[in-house]
Image: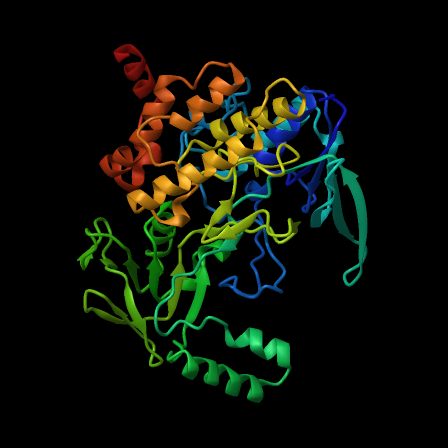
Amino acid sequence: MRQSYKVAVVGGGFAGLVTARELKREGLLVTVFEKADHVGGIWLYNSRVETDLLGLDPNREIVHSSLYRSLRVNLPRQIMGFMDYPFMKKEGGDPRTFPGHEEVLKFLEDFVRDFRLMELIRFGHEVVRVELTDEARHKWVVESRTRETESRWESKEELFEAVVICNGKHTEPKIAEFPGISLMPLEIIESALLNKEIASEIYNDICHILGRDAWPGLQMHSHNYRTPEQFENKIVVLIGNGSSAKDILKEISPLASQVHQAIRGPDSQLKRLENHDNAWQHSMIECARKDGKVVFQDGSIVDADVIIHCTGYKFHFPFLRSNGTVTVDDNRVGPLYKHVFPPSLAPWLSFVALPYKAVPSIVMESQAKWVAKVLSGKVKLPTQAEMADSVEELYRLMEKSGRPKHLTHTLQQDKFEYENWLATQLDIRPPERWKEIMFFSMEKIKSYYGDKYRDAWDVDKWIQEVDCSN
């Protein structure tokens, strides 16, 4: 392989920026397409929310960022930086070990400046199509559009030899489903038909066909949560038990009349939450009724005003035209060799930063290095058949163990097996042992310190103790 391939990178967030740097280091000709007018991706805060708060309308104008105004990172800055570019405390910045989102954006801005990446980025360019046009010469067309006026867009097509997809995984909401939830909000039908009476009839017919009487309150996904004021004196049902669910519950409970958290798992039971006078934990929702009541599987019932779905996201690549070669099925993007390369299109199409349950910066930087070195010819991939066999073996093992398809990209392990494998491919040192221990200790640490873990935990002291014990 020669070193002058033109490579398109879709996305200018954390993954896209480190990928651009690695490609540039390998002498490749890089163009980064970024929809926003600034770097940062999900770390670029936007106070706007989508018109469809559940994110079900495919024609809605998508707001990329999922940040709420008060968000602080849920991993220590010590494991958020890159191998040769740590996330250091800087004068005039947020000095906390778990800083606010503004500090992460500043880190990425500094990264772009220090590695001279700005000249590679096309801001305001939304990618609407990525398609292989010449398989023999691996030519990909990337069609992007820019907004000329409020109502007019200008499109442009360009050819590249390789495309790396880094568009993130926190934009397309995943919604909890139960009897009573409407799969299509009434407002969407009204806007499509421009007739409220006819829309209402169709809406009721849909609910009748599905056997669902629509719950009348406000529903939203955490993707569209920004500040707590709108929940003052409201009875709120919050679905989920991840970081965003816990943060939002803590923030809205002082204002809300009541907060009821619905969670899955064997430990879910009706109980008052510690340190909250007006918040309870329940099992999952059994149904939501048209009289406004929400019924939980534990038998309890509340008359709720709002349901917030803190239920995660789905992979979404609406611009990718691969004739079925790469699909998303129950959140499995595949087939992908080691979560990066589609065997039949490798190395000319790749994905960076798909895995969950991993230190994001370690995985995405290692994947970016791998992609760049494969494209520059310094690292070789297995044959197409060998890569395909590897993917099939993964799928067989998952099926045999009963692991559901949607966990394909979730790295379930008690050690950095994937991260160490990538390090071996690159012939570099694996991540430091303390980073591995820290990452897999996070849930215990959060449980020990409670919702004050970000400020109560002395991370530097903990690292010293772990280093001394190894």
14, above or below 84, in the image:
below
> Residue 273, percent across and down?
22, 53
Viewer-proximal residue among 174 and 86: 174
Outermost residue on the front side: it is 385
> Residue 60, percent across and down?
61, 63
> Residue 58, percent across and down?
59, 63
> Residue 321, percent across and down?
66, 51
In the image, taking residue 42 as reference, residue 453 lies left or right, namely left
Quarter-of-image position of residue 271: bottom left
80, above or below 264, in the image:
above
Viewer-proximal residue among 250 and 180: 180
Q: How many marks?
A: 0
Whether residue 94 is visible here, answered yes or no, is no
> Looking at the rendering, in which quadrant would you find the N terminus?
top right
Whether residue 25 is visible here, answered yes or no, is yes
Viewer-proximal residue among 284 and 351: 351
Q: Residue at x 32, y 24 (%)?
A: 437
Q: Residue at x 79, y 40 (%)?
A: 159
Q: Residue at x 59, y 42 (%)?
A: 41
Viewer-proximal residue among 397 and 220: 397
Quarter-of-image position of residue 262: bottom left
In the image, taking residue 282 as reference, residue 205 lies left or right, namely right
